[in-house]
Amino acid sequence: MNTLLNKADLIYLLTQQNKLDAAMRKELGISESDWMSTMAMEHSIALNVELHEFINACFKSWKYWKRKDMNMDDVLDEAIDVIHFCMLRLNKSTAKTEFIAGNVESELQDKRQLQDRAAVKRVIYHLSNGVMSAENILVYVLSILDYYGFTGQDIINQYNKKNAVNFQRLASGY
């Protein structure tokens, strides 16, 4: 397994997401209570949509009829969108950031490395058919990224780029 995200990396991502979400609440006039409860459905829908876009980007593991190569930049970009919404959902938890990050790090270490296309396909099947916690989705997506050779630094760099875009969108009224 490549060096993926450790506890410190996960705390960093959770913290960055919290900053974006706070800016979004302020800019859009969303109360903390609405964000935490009323908007849960919106956040779940968004995570589900982004997850399925990621699954579609990973088409070589399940679209046996496609002959073109996967665009690995698209795979990472779509994964980052999923990670953003996983972090949003995890930040809404009553658990402390350090606890959440420790759990995700532990689950990542406990998961068997995805060895082949069939293993990736099984994970994608579970992602596409089940209702899972944001933590489980995050671990599975990170495991797939590991299979495709991405590192923790790749993930953090792309997350930072997308986070900057999200702040620009917020400032421009996107």
Image (cartoon, rainbow, N blue to C red):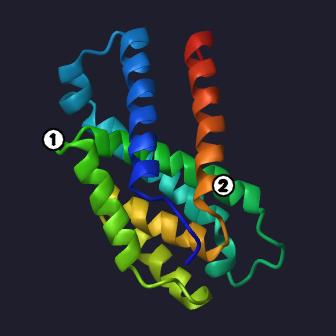
Tell me residue 129's x, y (percent): 38, 71
Q: Label 2 sits on what residue type?
A: Asp
Residue, x 57% and y 55% (percent of image)?
79
Q: Measured along the vertical axis of the image, is residue 110 above or below residue 118?
A: above
Q: Label 1 sits on what residue type?
A: Thr
The answer to whether marks 1 and 2 mark residues whose Cβ atoms lie closer than 8 Å is no
Q: Earlier in the sequence, mark 1 or mark 2?
A: 1
Instruction: Give the structural element (helix, strand or loop) at label 2.
Output: helix
Residue, x 23% and y 52% (percent of image)?
99
User: Which residue is the site of mark 2?
Assistant: 154
Q: Single out the mark in the foreground, 1 or 2.
A: 2
Residue, x 59% and y 43% (percent of image)?
159
In terms of depth relative to the viewer, which is nearer, 65 or 91?
A: 91
Q: Measured along the vertical axis of the image, is residue 109 above or below residue 32?
A: below
In terms of depth relative to the viewer, which is nearer, 103 or 118?
A: 103
CA distance separating discs 1 and 2: 29 Å
Tell me residue 140's x, y (percent): 44, 69
User: Which residue is the site of mark 1?
Assistant: 94
Quadrant of the drawing holding the C terminus? top right
